[in-house]
Amino acid sequence: MKNNLHFLLKRFSFAVMKTRKVTLSSIADDLNVSKTLVSLVLNGKADALSINKETQKRVIARANELNYKPNQVARGLRMGQTHTLGLLVADISNPFYARITRTIEHMAETEGYSLIVCSSDESESREKHLVKMLLDRQVDGIIMTTTMHQPEVLKEIIPTQFPLVLFDRYLTGFDSHYVGVDNEQATRNAVKHLLDLGHRNIGFLTLTPNYISTLYDRQQGYLTAFEAYNFPVTDKYLLQLDYVRLKNKDYNQITQFFLENPEITALFTSNNNLAIACLKTVKELGKRIPEDLSLITFDDVECFSYTAPAISCIAQPLEKIGEVAVKMALQQIKNKRIDSQKVILQTELIYRDSTCAIN
Amino acid sequence: MKNNLHFLLKRFSFAVMKTRKVTLSSIADDLNVSKTLVSLVLNGKADALSINKETQKRVIARANELNYKPNQVARGLRMGQTHTLGLLVADISNPFYARITRTIEHMAETEGYSLIVCSSDESESREKHLVKMLLDRQVDGIIMTTTMHQPEVLKEIIPTQFPLVLFDRYLTGFDSHYVGVDNEQATRNAVKHLLDLGHRNIGFLTLTPNYISTLYDRQQGYLTAFEAYNFPVTDKYLLQLDYVRLKNKDYNQITQFFLENPEITALFTSNNNLAIACLKTVKELGKRIPEDLSLITFDDVECFSYTAPAISCIAQPLEKIGEVAVKMALQQIKNKRIDSQKVILQTELIYRDSTCAIN
DNA sequence: GTCAAAACTTGTAACGTTTCTATTTGGAAT
DNA sequence: ATTCCAAATAGAAACGTTACAAGTTTTGAC
């Protein structure tokens, strides 16, 4: 009696509401079976449990008819897995990260994972906050570029054994999976190239904060290139730009730098944004590239090959980085407890038209 | 008795496991109160229900001590709100989308929403699949650029009244919130500028598929510019590039186009990728910009201002677009049932050095 | 001293799954 | 006929929250 009424009510509400929520229970009720059964069938576990073929068909038919889709949130809660990865980068609008993101997204998607993307904006506190947020949202793993100075904060907020992959930047004292390139070596080779071309007064343009591993290593590469050739190196030619100013397109420091050091004939910039900033400044100052200034930069962005002159650069294997990062993350998620591995990929020094021998 | 055993077990497991999961119940058990109480306190509803200040303090203290963070998945299930937005773009690695994404991400984040980001890759089936995925994941709203030809598919899979915002591209026959720019007008003005400079043989470089609203409108703008001035327009100068080929950097079509139509003195490109492709081709052909070819393009990307020559372009208000999109989405989520509004923002025609009067 | 209202707290259900442990039925083996 | 097993299904618990409807106890007014 009571059941009957219940049944009628459901029918009624079905007729009235435009879009009734369709759940396991609705299918089960419709067919007068248990939701356990429905779940089993729809998860392909029916045969193993020898569920009547006929019943299976009915369930599947009804599910299709109602266009049933399992609620992934409920599923996530029950199974303790959300099939979501957190991707935390310094700045998603930076082409370097945007392109890696794309690979990561596609790799993740083919494995059934979605991506929650966030940018730390090079702020340690934001990064902390965002990592916490991702953990609260129960992501199954995090792939990130850290902006941290010290490992303590991450150690504190990320549980040991939580699937984590750092890429691009590593964090000394923080043992985790990592994928990136040999920034020092790549820079050294690029600077050696400039030295080989006869340049001695080579500027090095980098960013604050200097403790970020990639920036630090690039600077080391610059220094060791000179060392390797036994040439003296001056602090004067090292310019460290403020990240915020760069973001705000305040390039005064660079102009100043050029004016104060007119003897500089070549310049290495530590990333794509700096190269672009430099292009603008140089243009304003009326310097010609490469005649007056040879330029070589870390990171390749699309337009570097089409500018006049085309910019020589160190290209990172972006796709590969994304690929490895996702693989590492999924590996940890699936096999649990894998000791952390580091993968160092090859960079490519691309010679274009922005460098030439000193006159 | 039974309770006591339970208690001991919990204590025991606490002692043994490195990181015990900390939930409302654990706090409640520790303090011998109900989880309802804990929930109430931690959600700031304690005062309204006149819960003892002392109790509140204990709860909060213990929560901090254990570093309790509510499980957002459970919360999402219970409350029917995940505080997650889906962001579906054509290609996250395209700077245009990447920059909008950044704004969207920040806006969303300050409102407590996270972003699941995905790229449709200009594929209708992928788009369909991704939208479904987002819905299965119970996102509270979707912000997207559609790649669809017809509205049917979206109508079928997205429930009416579901918080949805289209941006950049609209879909005729699909009534939804929308934010974008007047592509036709912007293009018309740009082409008029070229006409004003004396150019008559003006190429128009665009992408397939042509039914995408932005591309279609831009083409219309090109045509109506000529119409407005009563100049004849040739189909010959309209080149529609295949998206996949462009993505694969296959620029043969463009080269061919220039060779077949040497009389062209100016070119309008429909987006940033096309402009870049064009720069490369032009360079290979030994044409000079702007002397041999005036170029003006839709979309501004950072490097356009620093290339030599700097590229004239139509800039869209990226930040504003993202801002409006998020606002529209949240509005729908919060107020439910708002009739769909369209916001058309102003573009800016930026004159740089890539255009000049015909000789 | 009674009674209502305030202060304080709790148990239970629910969100939509999956998983674990039953239960029922019919038939084959003893 | 009993026992046992496989086939077929269902009930209940659990994931971690919040919401609802009830409890208690205390206070203040008459």
Image (tube, coloured by chain):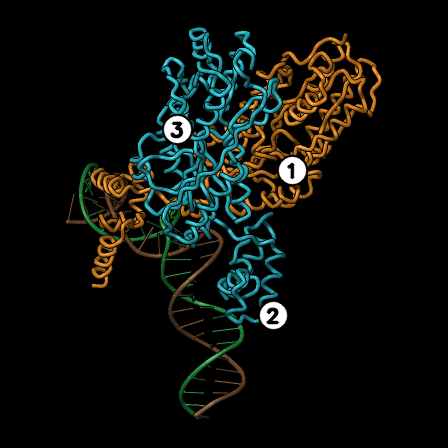
Chain colours: A cyan, B orange, C brown, D green
Q: Is residue C5 above or below residue C11?
A: above
Left or right for A358, reference A126 = right
Left or right for A34, reference A178 = right
Query: Residue B193 is drawn in which quadrant?
Result: top right
Q: Residues within 10 Å of mark 3 (few under 14, many from 20)?
A: many
| Residue B122: assigned label | 1
User: What is the chain identity of the residue bearing mark 2?
Assistant: A
Inspect the image, locate mark 3, and give the three-letter code of the amino acid beneath it. Answer: Asp
Quick one: B60 or B266, which is closer to the camera?
B266
Inspect the image, locate mark 1, and give the three-letter code of the amino acid beneath it. Answer: Glu
- Residue at 29% x, 44% y: name it: B38
- Is tag 3's residue or tag 2's residue first in the polypeptide sequence? 2
Inspect the image, locate mark 2, and give the three-letter code of the amino acid beneath it. Answer: Glu
* Residue A153 placement (x, y as % from top left): 31, 35
Q: Are marks 1 and 3 in contact (CB under 8 Å)?
A: no
Q: Residues within 10 Å of mark 1 (few under 14, many from 20)?
A: many
| Residue A217: assigned label | 3
Query: Residue C4 is drawn in which quadrant?
Result: top left
Query: Helix, strand, or loop for circle 2?
Result: helix
Quick one: B159 or A97, which is closer to the camera?
A97
Kindly report the distance in space between the C-alpha atoms of the residues bearing marks 1 and 3: 39 Å
Q: Is residue A139 above or below residue B3?
A: above
* Residue corresponding to mark 2: A54
User: What is the chain identity of the residue bearing mark 3?
Assistant: A
User: What is the chain identity of the residue bearing mark 1?
Assistant: B
* Residue D23 placement (x, y as % from top left): 27, 53
Which of discs 3 and 2 lies nearer the camera? The answer is 3
Quadrant position of the C terminus of chain B in the picture:
top right
Asked if labels 3 and 2 share a chain, the reply is yes
Q: Are marks 3 and 2 in contact (CB under 8 Å)?
A: no
Query: Helix, strand, or loop for circle 1?
Result: loop
